[in-house]
Image: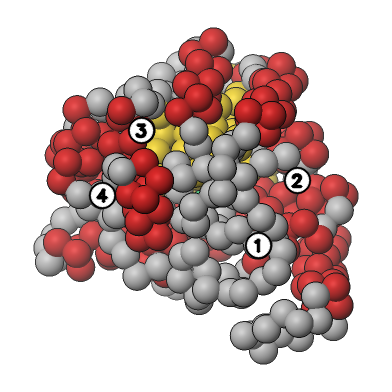
């Protein structure tokens, strides 16, 4: 494959010095960044390259989402406004009312939203990923697939945080078997663009035996593992009743904390838990946009100070990492009453190198440096809401929008160019998912007419 050079652009390298090169260029050979520097130098060293005119454009390292649930696009406009666990008395999960084909469409739509908002890597945490894995892989995203396990016995209307009625060895083996199958099919696939993590969904539905098996699975494949941790007050109460310990301490007692764990949320952690998470060098993924909807600000600065590596993620219903970065900046400033920290350069680092470190992928992705993967996006700086653009990272985080992103490259391939996603028929998909959503919520009302529906839905 010939080398491509994006020239005469502003290159936000995201390297350790936060170098921004004005009138710069980046050379991409196959799936790798082969040169970054002043345009004249890079063009001079690459006389045969295909040149992309980058005037008026900025090139940034792809954003890395450490915590997503792609199917949750189905709950848009439903669950954002009712706390966590959502105070919605549904008799069954809405996800039990969609077919495998519909799951493929939902997950693909989520991946398209991720690409459009500058994400090049996404960790998908869910149960039953195998059904739609091929579809999301075909979008071109760099993926970490984390198949959820659990062995807590719960009913169809279970809400996270509630105490399971018991624990089942049979259920544990079935769920672990599914996770193993996903590993054997996808771990390392597509030039290592796809990898797998081990995962157990919730602390409260995980027995000590399951925790040991999940960590063991990750160790066998030399990869990471993930869990939701301390995401609600109900979870903390449930763990006190069930195990006589706070959630992080239960994990510490079962040797589950450590630098290969990516713990999602850590919203309700006390001082002893922050110390335990930090001393084990546990990695944490922070979902500030979702946390702010839940009216909580996790003690992220304290976790960072204690020694945790912190990445960023989206969580339910949206895959928009731009919104995540802006919310991270604003909520942390409010929480710490500090109007000058964090800076925009800090939050973009959290969403790139921070997330790359959290996923143990910082040697390959997270910055635009020679030898790293060609994962990047380009924004059009010639917009009424962005100029003047002397300090593009700040201009974009404060005044920009995901719609400023016009092109996205992942693993050396353009997956979006000039505003068009190249790997999916997007307009058809949007229509299809709108139909799927209306059908699924109508089905909920038809099959469970006693559902007390607190929303003014119009599913027709
Ligand atoms: Zn989650």
Residue plotted at (86% across, 53% down) = 99
Quick one: label 2 or label 3, which is nearer the N terminus?
A: 3
Distance (Cα) linking label 1 and label 4: 27 Å
Does residue 402 appear anywhere in the picture? Answer: yes
How far apart marks 4 and 3 lie (CA) works out to 13 Å
User: Quadrant of the image for the C terminus?
Assistant: bottom right
User: What residue would you read off at disc 2?
Assistant: 422
**Above or below for 387 versus 366:** below
- The residue carrying mark 4 is 269
At label 1, counting other C-alpha atoms closer than 10 Å, the crowd grade (few under 14, some 14-19, many 20 or more) is few
Q: CA distance from mark 1 to mark 2?
A: 39 Å
Q: Quadrant of the N terminus?
A: top right
Q: Nearer the viewer, mark 2 or mark 4?
A: 4
Mark 2 → mark 4, Cα distance in angstroms: 43 Å
Taking the spot 58% from the left edge, 74% from the top edge, the residue there is: 88
Q: Which residue is pictured at 46% across the width and 45% down the height? A: 204
Q: Earlier in the sequence, mark 1 or mark 2?
A: 1
Asked if the residues shown at circle 2 and circle 3 are in contact, with their CB atoms under 8 angstroms apart, the answer is no
Residue 273: x and y in percent read 22, 41
Label 2 vs label 3: CA separation?
A: 43 Å
Residue ID for mark 1: 157
Figure check: 189 above or below 379:
above
- Above or below residue 83? Residue 149 is above
Mark drawn on residue 251: 3
Q: Is residue 157 left or right of residue 7?
A: right
Q: Are marks 1 and 2 in contact (CB under 8 Å)?
A: no
Q: Nearer the viewer, mark 2 or mark 3?
A: 3
Q: Which residue is drawn at the image coordinates 62% and 85% (left, top)?
A: 454
Element type at mark 3: helix
């Amino acid at each position: 494959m010939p080398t491509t050079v994006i020239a005469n652009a502003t290159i936000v390298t995201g390297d350790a010095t936060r170098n921004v090169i004005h009138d710069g260029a980046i050379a991409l050979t196959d799936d790798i960044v082969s040169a970054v520097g002043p345009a004249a130098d890079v063009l001079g060293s690459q006389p045969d390259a295909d040149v992309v005119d980058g005037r008026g454009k900025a090139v940034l390292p792809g954003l890395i989402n450490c915590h997503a649930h792609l199917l949750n696009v189905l709950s848009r406009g439903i669950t954002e406004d009712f706390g966590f666990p959502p105070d919605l008395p549904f008799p069954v999960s809405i996800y039990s009312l969609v077919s495998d084909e519909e799951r493929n469409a939902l997950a693909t739509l989520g991946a398209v939203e991720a690409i459009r908002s500058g994400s090049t890597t996404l960790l998908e945490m869910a149960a039953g990923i195998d059904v739609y894995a091929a579809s999301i892989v075909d979008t071109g995203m760099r993926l970490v697939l984390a198949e959820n396990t659990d062995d807590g016995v719960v009913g169809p209307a279970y809400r996270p945080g509630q105490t399971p009625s018991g624990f089942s060895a049979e259920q544990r083996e079935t769920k672990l078997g599914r996770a193993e199958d996903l590993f054997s099919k996808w771990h390392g696939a597509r030039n290592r663009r796809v990898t797998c993590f081990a995962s157990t969904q919730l602390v409260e539905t995980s027995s000590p035996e399951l925790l040991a098996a999940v960590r063991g699975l990750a160790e066998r494949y030399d990869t990471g593992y993930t869990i939701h941790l301390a995401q609600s007050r109900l979870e903390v109460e449930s763990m006190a009743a069930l195990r006589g310990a706070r959630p992080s301490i239960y994990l510490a007692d079962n040797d589950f904390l450590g630098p290969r764990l990516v713990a999602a949320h850590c919203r309700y952690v006390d001082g002893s838990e922050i110390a335990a998470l930090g001393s084990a060098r546990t990695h944490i993924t922070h979902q500030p946009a979702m946390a702010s909807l839940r009216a909580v600000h996790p003690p992220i600065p304290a976790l960072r100070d204690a020694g945790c590596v912190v990445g960023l993620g989206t969580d339910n219903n949206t895959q928009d990492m731009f919104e995540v970065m802006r919310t991270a900046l604003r909520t942390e400033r409010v929480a710490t009453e500090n109007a000058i920290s964090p800076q925009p350069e800090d939050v973009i680092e959290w969403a790139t190198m921070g997330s790359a470190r959290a996923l143990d992928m910082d040697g390959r992705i997270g910055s635009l440096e020679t030898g790293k993967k060609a994962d990047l996006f380009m924004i059009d700086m010639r917009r009424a809401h962005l100029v003047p653009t002397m300090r593009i990272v700040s201009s974009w985080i404060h005044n920009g929008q995901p719609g400023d992103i016009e092109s996205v490259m992942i693993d050396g391939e353009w997956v979006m160019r000039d505003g068009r996603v190249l790997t999916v028929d997007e307009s058809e998909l949007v229509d299809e998912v709108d139909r799927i959503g209306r059908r699924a919520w109508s089905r909920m009302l038809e099959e469970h007419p006693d559902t007390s529906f607190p929303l003014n839905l119009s599913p027709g």
